[in-house]
Structures are given as C-alpha cells and as structure tokens.
Image: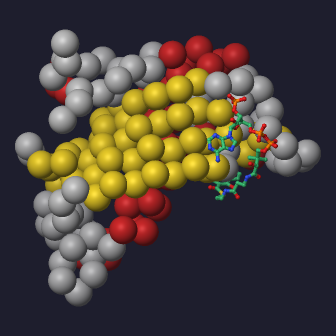
Amino acid sequence: MNMPVTAQPNLFRQTRKVRFSHCDPAGMVFFPRYLVQLNDLVEDWFDEALGINYAEFITTRKFGLPTVKLDCSFQSPGVFGSEIEWQLSVERIGNSSIGLMVRGVDGDQLRFELHSVLVATSVHQGGAMALPEDLRAALLRFRGTQAAE
Ligand SMILES: CC(C)(COP(=O)(O)OP(=O)(O)OC[C@H]1O[C@@H](n2cnc3c(N)ncnc32)[C@H](O)[C@@H]1OP(=O)(O)O)[C@@H](O)C(=O)NCCC(=O)NCCSC(=O)c1cc(O)c2ccccc2c1O
C-alpha cells in the first residue's frame, strides 16, 4: 500500500520559490536551473538532515561526490512566482554509491522526477571510496520508496 507523501518520514523536503533568474522568457523554469538546485538540495540535505557538514566533507575530509548518472523527467512546467516542494529520498545505498530520487511537486502537480547516482571518491586518488560509516548510517534514515503516482 502506498503511504501518502505527507506521512513519509524518509523524505527530505524543501520548498523553493521559482525565481525570475530560473526562468526562460516564457516564464518557465529552464531545465539546467533545476540541476543546479539539485546540487544545492544535496548540500542542504547533508547539513540539515544527515548531520554531516557538506563543505567539511569535501574540503576537510577530502571526499568528492560526483554525479555518475542522472535521469530526468519533466512532467509539467515550473512557473515564475510559484513554489515547488523538493522531496528527496534514497533509492539505493551501494559500497561507494548513493542512488537518489527527487521529486518536485507544486500542490497536486508533479513538475519533475529526477533519479541520480552519486559516488564517494577520493579527492586525492580520484577513484571510488567506500562510503564512510557516519554517512552510511545517516543515509539509512532516508531509504524508502516514495508514493507512486
Ligand atoms: C566516480 C568515478 C571515479 C567512479 O569510477 P571507479 O572506477 O572508481 O568506480 P566504479 O566504476 O567501480 O563505480 C563505483 C560505484 O558507482 C557505481 N556507478 C558507477 N558509474 C555508474 C553509472 N553510470 N550508473 C550507476 N552507477 C554507477 C558502480 O556501480 C559502483 O557501485 P557500488 O554499488 O559499488 O557503490 C568515475 O565514474 C568518474 O570519474 N566519473 C565521472 C564523474 C563526473 O565527471 N561527473 C560529472 C559531474 S562532476 C560532479 O557532479 C561533481 C559534483 C560534486 O558535488 C562534487 C563535489 C566534490 C568534488 C567533485 C564533485 C563533482 O565532480
């Protein structure tokens, strides 16, 4: 049975206004602006929900977190002045990779659904690194499936 999105504890949510600077001349979100915001969302999720300072993770602990896969579907246009709730959950936790699903919802309308895979890497050596234990434990709280449409 699908749980309503509002009842799901394993979602990180953030509501963001669609700004003029996000839009094309028709007043609709230009899709690369969603991708920049996706990265911002991941940073905020680390800081605010996972309890891991993202900047320290990169600069002090020397992990990289590049995206190796990104699959995007855009169901309806994001409109200048509207608000979109970003809902993030973890689809898969690998040895070094993290599979994410992110939905953008405006009221009862789905704007987009993104699936991405991030890989923990060593900034020094460049290759994949096992996810550190504190990150792995924190990720477990967000693992789960979101309600299917
Ligand atoms: C990231 C790589 C160095 C990994 O290559 P490597 O050979 O070391 O590792 P594996 O191939 O074994 O993969 C490890 C792990 O990931 C899974 N995986 C790899 N590729 C895919 C894929 N395409 N789809 C799905 N899954 C994939 C694989 O199955 C393994 O899974 P586990 O279950 O074992 O965990 C190398 O792939 C690479 O360098 N890729 C290029 C990355 C890139 O240039 N991306 C473009 C954008 S860069 C970016 O987004 C970025 C964002 C940040 O926020 C950063 C922050 C800090 C530093 C850098 C950042 C950054 O570059």
Q: Could you say which is closer to the camera, residue 110 or residue 133?
A: 110
Q: Residue at x 77, y 26 (%)?
A: 130
Q: Could you say which is closer to the camera, residue 67 or residue 73?
A: 73
Q: Could you say which is closer to the camera, residue 61 or residue 106?
A: 106
Q: Residue at x 30, y 43 (%)?
A: 103
The image's colour scheme reads secondary structure
Could you tell whether 44 is left or right of 112 in the image? right
Residue 38 on image: x %, y %: 44, 52
Quadrant holding the N terminus: top left
For this orientation, the residue located farthest to the bottom is 25
Residue 109 on image: x %, y %: 12, 48
For this orientation, the residue located farthest to the right is 125
Quadrant holding the C terminus: top left
Residue 100 on image: x %, y %: 47, 36
Q: How many numbered discs sit on the rendered protein? A: 0
Figure check: 106 above or below 52 = below
Residue 78 on image: x %, y %: 20, 63
**In the picture, residue 28 is in which quadrant?**
bottom left
Q: Residue at x 84, y 43 (%)?
A: 127
